Amino acid sequence: MRWSGKFGLGLVLLLIGSGCGGAKLAKLYPVTGTVTYDGKPLANASVLLVPETGAAAIGQTDGEGHFSLRTQGTEGAVEGPAKIAVTATENVKKVTAEEFEKMTDAERAKASKSLIPPRYGNPEASELTTTVSTTTKNEIQLDLTK
């Protein structure tokens, strides 16, 4: 179970105000892609797309590094320029969901380790960007390196 990655990504979504109850969702466009790390598919990574305006989109890679994005549970992302964050962690200490909720941030950090450089987990620092188009296929290739 990948609690720490999901927690961190959930926190990012909460902090950027990705949605308000009852708010109408903007028109969404399908976005798919692939994440590699040092030339190999990155499985079980979380991908976060933060547009300049509108709600953030999130996706999870499969075993081949492929993902599709969803915004507030609906397939797609809003059009326009966006920054991207990618997180991939593995647990180094087994904990239950209840134990995880009681842990401090420092304890959570010790319970997992990042499989990729931490800069990729911050959309402001990752240098990963894209523009979601209304007229062309939105296929993103994210080639991460050390």
Image: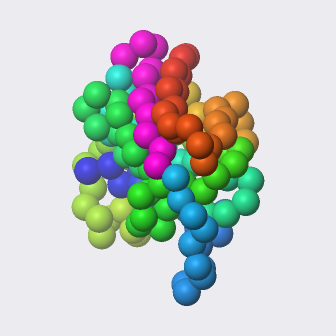
- Which residue: 60% across, 56% down? 78
- How many dots with numbers? 0
- Which residue: 30% across, 70% down? 98
Q: In the displayed structure, does residue 50 sit left or right of residue 137? A: right
Q: Residue furthest top?
A: 39
Q: Residue furthest bottom?
A: 22
Q: Residue furthest front?
A: 135
Residue 118 horizontal/vertical position (percent): 58, 34
Residue 48 horizontal/vertical position (percent): 53, 48
Image-quadrant location for residue 14:
bottom right
Image-quadrant location for residue 46:
top left
The secondary structure making up most of the magenta span is strand
Residue 18 in sight from this viewpoint:
no
The one nearer the camera, 36 or 96, is 36
Bounds of the magenta segment: 30-40
Check the image and tell me how it is coloured. Answer: rainbow
Residue 17 in sight from this viewpoint:
yes
* Residue 2 counted in the magenta span: no
Question: Where 110 falls versus 39 (above or below)?
Answer: below
- Which residue: 67% across, 63% down? 54
- Which residue: 35% across, 30% down? 65
Question: Where 26 falls versus 29 (above or below)?
Answer: below
Residue 26 horizontal/vertical position (percent): 60, 68
Residue 102 horizontal/vertical position (percent): 40, 69
The one nearer the camera, 50 or 88, is 50
Looking at the rendered image, the quarter that the C terminus falls into is top right
